[in-house]
Amino acid sequence: VHLRSLVEAMDNTKAELQLRVASSQNRLLRAEVGFVMAMFWLAAAGLVAGGYGMNLHNGSEWQTAGPFDALKPSHRPNFDGPSWVALEVIWGTTIGSAFGAVLMAVGLYHYGVF
């Protein structure tokens, strides 16, 4: 009788430890999903930034098409500044990636991932 209760206690302890390990694995998987989603949004923003950040002249860096247009030619910087199009892309990418990351986090929280 005493041996059966000892075996039963060992089985219960084993089941409890397996549940704890499974719970820890689930928390790690949730954290991994969060990190993957964060890296996705950073990569999406980096793709656009990389396209506009290359040392190629694409017309988006003309002085007369951007914020330096209102300055006298003698007061303009010697380099080609950003155009309004480039600034719109930069701010759009920054705000869009932040907004997308927040929406993704809220969605994952809503579905119980976090």
Image: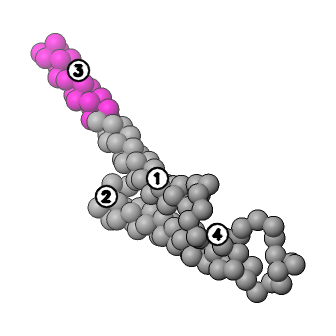
The Cα–Cα distance between marks 3 and 1, rounded to whole angstroms, is: 49 Å
Q: Viewed as shown, does residue 62 lie left or right of 72?
A: left
Q: Residue at x 80, y 84 (%)?
A: 71
Contact (Cβ within 8 Å) of mark 3 with mark 1: no
Number of labels in the image equals 4
Could you say where residue 80 lies in the image, as x and y percent from the top left?
Answer: 72, 67
What is the secondary structure assignment of the residue under circle 3? helix
Could you say where residue 82 lies in the image, as x and y percent from the top left?
Answer: 66, 70
Give the vertical position of 19 relative to 7 (above or below): below
Residue farthest to the bottom, as pictured: 70
Q: Viewed as shown, does residue 106 lie left or right of 88?
A: left
- What label sits on residue 61 in the rendered view? 4
Q: Nearer the viewer, residue 97 or 75?
A: 75
- Indicate which disc, 1 or 2, sits on the residue closer to the N terminus: 1
Q: What secondary structure prevails in the magenta region?
A: helix
Q: Nearer the viewer, residue 6 or 59?
A: 59
Give the vertical position of 20 relative to 2 (above or below): below
Q: Which mark lies nearer to you, 1 or 4?
A: 4
Kind of residue at disc 2: Gly
- Indicate which disc, 3 or 4, sits on the residue closer to the N terminus: 3
Residue 13 within the magenta-colored segment of the rendering: yes
Report which residue position mark 3 lands on.
Answer: 10
On the rendered image, what quadrant is the C terminus found in?
Answer: bottom left
Q: Viewed as shown, does residue 79 lie left or right of 55?
A: right
The Cα–Cα distance between marks 4 and 2, rounded to whole angstroms, is: 45 Å
Give the vertical position of 81 relative to 32 (above or below): below
Residues shaded magenta: 1-21
- Indicate which disc, 1 or 4, sits on the residue closer to the N terminus: 1
The Cα–Cα distance between marks 1 and 4, rounded to whole angstroms, is: 24 Å
